[in-house]
Amino acid sequence: MFPKLTTNRLVLREFQQDDLEPICTHINNYDVSKMLTVVPYPYSKADGEWWLNHIFETPLSEATNWAIESEGVFAGAIGIRIPEDGHPRIGYWLGEPFWGKGYMSEAAEAVVNYCFETLGATKVTSGAFEENDGSLNVLAKNGFQTVGSRPEKSRARKEQDVTLIEVELTRDLWEAMRAVAV
């Protein structure tokens, strides 16, 4: 069963076929796609169809992808994949009309909590390009600590190397942050 998550302002739900149009509209924006590693630009309907089919076919034990909905409107995506090391890795994007409202910090908090509470993770990882202040702020607000950097190719930038800041959040730090928040 798909793990639907809710926050004060958002619903993180399973993707549906009718999400195709808003996905393509929002991600076919260079300011969005240039901050992602594997997303092409321009982003076509065929790209969106491939991605939706991919997430529908991928077992939840390997990856879980949520559509982010605000007031019933598709706003973006957040997901986790479970690499070989077993530590969930979070990735996300938000359509430009939804930037600057704190939505991604809220969605990321819900997914981080899911990773620790439901999946029993001992560590959650993520990363963002060094120029992506918004994403780095989302990660910092959620307690992620920088553990390094490395070059990573950006498909939207024609395979240009961009510095990726690697971050992680350990269960111990997450638990300490939650104890302070209470």
Image: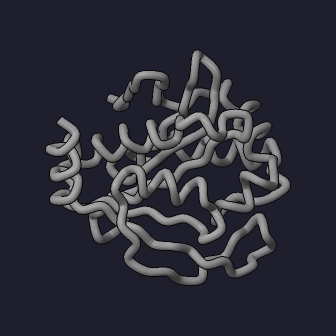
Q: Is residue 162 above or below residue 63?
A: below
Residue depicted at 14% across the width and 44% down the height: 179
Q: At x 61% / y 78%, what residue is drawn?
A: 163
Q: Position of residue 66 (x, y in %)?
A: 48, 37
Residue shown at 74% from the left, 46% from the top: 27
Quadrant in the picture for the N terminus: top left
Q: Position of residue 76 (x, y in %)?
A: 61, 38
Q: In the figure, is residue 152 to the left or right of 104?
A: right
Q: Is residue 155 left or right of residue 60?
A: right
Which residue is at a point 37% across and 42% down the rendered structure image? 109
Q: Nearer the viewer, residue 17 or 145?
A: 145
Give the answer, above or below, for where 104 lies relative to 176: above
| 38 lies left or right of 24 | left
Residue 111: x %, y % from top left: 37, 42
What residue occupies the far top of the structure in this picture? 72
How many discs mark residues in the rendered view? 0
Give how far across and how far down residue 100 sits, in percent.
Answer: 63, 40
For the rendered model, the colour scheme is one colour
Horizontal side of residue 152 vs 141, given as left or right: right
Above-or-below relation of 146 to 107: below
Compared to residue 181, the image places residue 82 above or below, namely below
Depth check: 68 or 20 in front? 68
Quadrant position of the C terminus in the picture: top left
